[in-house]
Image (tube, grey):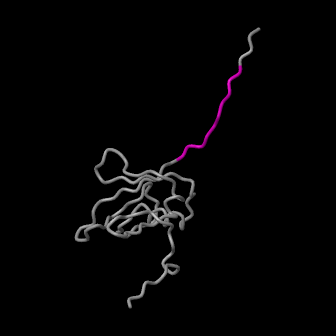
Amino acid sequence: MIKSSIEVSLTPCVQVVIVTVRPTAGRPGHYDASISPGNGPPMRPSRYPLLDACRALIAAGADPRGEIELWHAGATHYSLRTTIGAAARLMVRETGGRPIFVEHQPFGLRPVLRSR
């Protein structure tokens, strides 16, 4: 008699959150963003829509381990893909004309730069 065994692994279906952006009319460097599925929080025009969307999603109770993609309207492939939590922890600092990712600091906790 031949014994056979079949192992079945059940993994939950992961829904990827999609952020679709298009340039904001009259505001160079800003983007209008929409979050799909359509139950995402409303978004204001942003210079960094993926990072802002991730912080809004975390505030709305999203799982930080969830995956998220940034798509430009009309594109055939995503521009960026990460987890919601990883992107929510980042902000962009522009120094010397070169943007870099740094750890996000909420507005009230950022150091204030004073002119002399």
Q: Nearer the viewer, residue 90 or 84?
A: 90
Residue 53 colored magenta? no
Q: Residue visible at 27% across and 66% down? A: 24
Q: Which residues are magenta?
A: 5-14
Q: Residue furthest bottom?
A: 116
Q: Residue visible at 26% across and 71% down? A: 27
Q: Residue furthest left?
A: 26
Q: Residue visible at 52% across and 58% down? A: 86
Give coordinates of residue 2: x percent, y percent: 74, 10
Prevalent SS, magenta region: loop
Quadrant where the N terminus lies? top right
Residue 7 colored magenta? yes
Q: Nearer the viewer, residue 78 or 32?
A: 78
Q: Quadrant of residue 76?
A: top left
Give coordinates of residue 79: x percent, y percent: 37, 51
Q: Nearer the viewer, residue 4 or 98?
A: 98
Give coordinates of residue 34: x percent, y percent: 38, 60
Q: Residue furthest top?
A: 1
Q: Quadrant of residue 4?
A: top right
Count of numbered tags = 0
Give coordinates of residue 115: x percent, y percent: 38, 89
Q: Residue visible at 50% across and 51% down? A: 67
Quadrant where the C terminus lies? bottom left
